[in-house]
Image: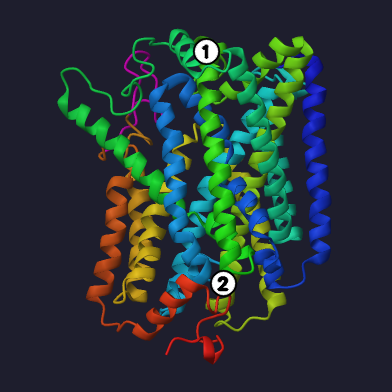
């Protein structure tokens, strides 16, 4: 897609971003001295800074590239993804601010606040955090390999600078993994936050530029853009109506029609409810000094995220209108390159071939920066949970030295990053869309029940928290393993496998592709039954203290029981 002369510009922009962020990491390393600095950036970020970084954490490459592609190919149904992500964000913020006030560094700080059996709760929370993060990491890193191969114009069987397409993807995965490990090991939360801020500014600015250029092609008339998009689509009559991709009615098969609708509901439920349980989103709220700054960061994040998802509509429908369904699917059947193809088309229209290459290279570099920033946040969340929750509170009985904890966090970042690199290389040829959906489903099934019940149910116990986490975690993974995502789904026209495993392997017994509709209620059920069936007595006084702290922020960032006496709940 990109001309040979534009490859040097693409590589130059990639290298420039990496060098700038490595410089930030060296600066952050010099000012990172203790656990507060490493885990929470010293809680020194303003509401505006954290709001921009928070928006950056949420606006992943899947949002930028994936949603634009879905809208370009599916029209109205793709538009539902934008709405779903935005609604998920608004609902999540109702919980994460309460968690920020109640916790210190991680989600487990909230879940263990009232727990008599803290080691079990913290171990379960650490396992869930690492599992969700690794699935998310895989999707981002494999996407990075495919993105760079595409931008360099390396196709299967071709070479660039003596490197084959497959080798280029592997090399990209290794580079992304190495850089993210460096960010986290040496810069901690300070470096990761500033990388997120830079990435968020670049992403929003580039999306705004593309939106203005797209609308200008249609005289700033959205109706004209929608009409042109429908005409260039694969189904002009139904492009702007629901039912083209999700919840389809199958003629003569009412059962499959019902299952399609349930699958769509399941996906929406997992998407909306899973965001509040994503560990890297929760951890972002611990970087501000007080509850007031947390609320300001929420306001900034709502504005930026809302504006961004509105602009993805213009990118998606603009790509459908100006690039066309056939050209998009020829480049990538899933539509993940639609935004990049749109950038090239717009640049060519306004600036000729050079303009097309420049705009494509810049948008590609922004997408690459987006992946780097997101994977860094995920690795930091995982390493923080392992060091603070498992090492600090389980292995060291809650009495580790800060230097020990930070050292373990750095080692954990290296180990998790290395594991993610290895798994991403193995999975580089696999369609990883299911990994993102699974990450949301796991977060909603395992983390959300324990979070909600810890904050709002006085009777809740540590036994219920452990049961809810393990029940939701195991249930969601098992259901996906037995679903058409892994085996048994075949294209009725070509006969090719649409599942993870090849044609001929079929052990799917669960009919839905996303387990959220079943696994989320199952997680809540396990948490409730674990509480009611255990002999453990609830810590009612701790619940009262948690309620006051979560709503007011009084005593925030201190372990339970260590707040000054005048701040304690009687």
- Percent x, y of residue 71: 47, 24
Instruction: Give SS at disc 2.
Output: loop
Q: Which mark is residue 18?
A: none
Q: The N terminus appears in which quarter of the rendering?
A: top right
- Magenta region, mostly helix, strand or loop? loop
Residue 255 spot, x, y in % from top left: 17, 29
Q: Quadrant of the C terminus?
A: bottom left
Q: Determine crowd level at label 2: few under 14, some 14-19, many 20+ residues with C-alpha closer than 10 A.
A: many
Q: Residue at x 64, y 62 (%)?
A: 412
Circle 1 SS class: helix
Indicate which label's residue lies in the foreground, 1 or 2. 1
Q: In this picture, which residue range is highlighted in magenta? A: 489-508
Q: Is residue 14 above or below residue 294?
A: above
> What residue would you read off at disc 1?
321
- Residue 268 placed where, x, y %? 36, 40
Q: Is residue 167 visible?
A: no
Determine which residue is flagged by label 2: 104
Q: Residues within 10 Å of mark 1 (few under 14, many from 20)?
A: many
Q: Is residue 51 above or below residue 501?
A: below
Q: Nearer the viewer, residue 121 or 370?
A: 370
Residue 245 is one of the magenta-drawn residues: no
> Which of the 4 quarters of the picture holds residue 252?
top left
Q: Nearer the viewer, residue 115 or 427?
A: 115
Instruction: Tell me: 252 left or right of 320.
Output: left
Q: What is the distance, in whole Å, between disc 1 and disc 2 at their CAs? A: 48 Å
Q: Is residue 224 left or right of residue 480?
A: right
Identified at 82% across, 30% down, the residue is 12
Task: Please say if 290 is above or below 184.
Answer: below
Q: Position of residue 60 (x, y in %)?
A: 57, 41
């Amino acid at each position: 897609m990109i001309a040979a002369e534009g490859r040097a510009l693409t590589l130059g922009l990639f290298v420039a971003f990496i060098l700038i962020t490595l410089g930030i990491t060296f600066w952050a390393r010099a000012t990172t001295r203790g656990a507060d600095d490493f885990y929470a950036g010293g809680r020194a970020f303003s509401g505006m800074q954290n709001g921009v970084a928070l928006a950056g954490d949420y606006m992943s490459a899947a949002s930028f590239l994936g949603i634009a592609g879905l809208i370009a190919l599916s029209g109205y149904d793709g538009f539902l993804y934008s709405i779903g992500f935005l609604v998920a964000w608004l609902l999540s913020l109702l919980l994460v601010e309460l968690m920020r006030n109640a916790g210190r560094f991680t989600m487990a700080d909230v879940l263990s606040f009232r727990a008599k059996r803290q080691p079990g709760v913290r171990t379960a929370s650490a396992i869930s955090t690492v599992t969700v993060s690794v699935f998310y990491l895989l999707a981002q890193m494999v996407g990075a390999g495919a993105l760079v191969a595409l931008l360099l114009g390396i196709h299967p069987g071709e070479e660039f600078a003596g490197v084959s397409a497959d080798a280029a993807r592997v090399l990209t995965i290794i580079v992304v993994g190495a850089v993210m490990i460096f960010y986290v090991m040496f810069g901690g939360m300070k470096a990761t936050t500033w990388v997120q801020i830079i990435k968020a500014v670049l992403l929003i600015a580039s999306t705004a530029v593309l939106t203005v250029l797209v609308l200008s092609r249609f005289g700033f008339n959205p109706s004209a853009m929608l009409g042109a998009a429908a005409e260039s689509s694969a189904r002009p009559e139904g492009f702007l109506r629901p039912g083209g991709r999700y919840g389809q009615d199958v003629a003569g098969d009412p059962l499959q029609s019902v299952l399609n609708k349930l699958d769509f509901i399941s996906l929406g439920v997992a998407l909306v409810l899973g965001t509040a349980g994503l560990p890297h989103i929760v951890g972002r709220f611990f970087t501000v000094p007080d509850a007031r700054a947390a609320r300001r960061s929420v306001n900034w994040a709502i504005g930026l995220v809302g504006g961004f998802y509105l602009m993805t509509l213009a990118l998606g429908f603009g790509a459908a209108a100006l690039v066309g369904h056939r050209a998009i699917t020829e480049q990538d059947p899933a539509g993940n390159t639609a935004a990049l193809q749109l950038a090239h088309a717009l640049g060519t229209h306004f600036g000729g071939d050079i303009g097309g290459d420049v705009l494509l290279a810049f948008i590609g570099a922004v997408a690459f920066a987006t992946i780097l920033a997101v994977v860094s946040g995920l690795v930091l969340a995982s390493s923080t949970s392992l060091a603070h929750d498992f090492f600090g509170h389980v292995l060291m009985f809650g009495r580790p030295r800060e230097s020990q904890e930070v050292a373990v966090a750095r080692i954990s970042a290296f180990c998790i990053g290395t594991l993610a690199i290895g798994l991403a290389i193995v999975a580089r040829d696999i369609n990883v869309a299911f990994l993102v959906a699974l990450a949301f489903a796991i977060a909603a099934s395992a983390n959300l029940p324990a979070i909600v019940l810890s904050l709002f149910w006085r009777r809740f116990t540590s036994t219920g928290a452990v049961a809810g986490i393990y029940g939701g975690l195991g249930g969601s993974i098992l259901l996906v393993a037995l679903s058409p995502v892994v085996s048994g789904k075949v294209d009725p026209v070509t006969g090719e496998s649409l599942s993870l495993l090849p044609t001929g392997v079929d052990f799917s017994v669960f009919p839905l592709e996303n387990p959220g509709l079943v696994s989320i209620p199952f997680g809540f059920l396990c948490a409730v039954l674990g509480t009611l069936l255990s002999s453990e007595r609830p810590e009612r006084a701790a619940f009262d203290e948690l309620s006051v702290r979560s709503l007011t922020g009084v005593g925030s960032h201190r372990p339970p029981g260590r707040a000054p006496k005048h701040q304690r709940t009687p």
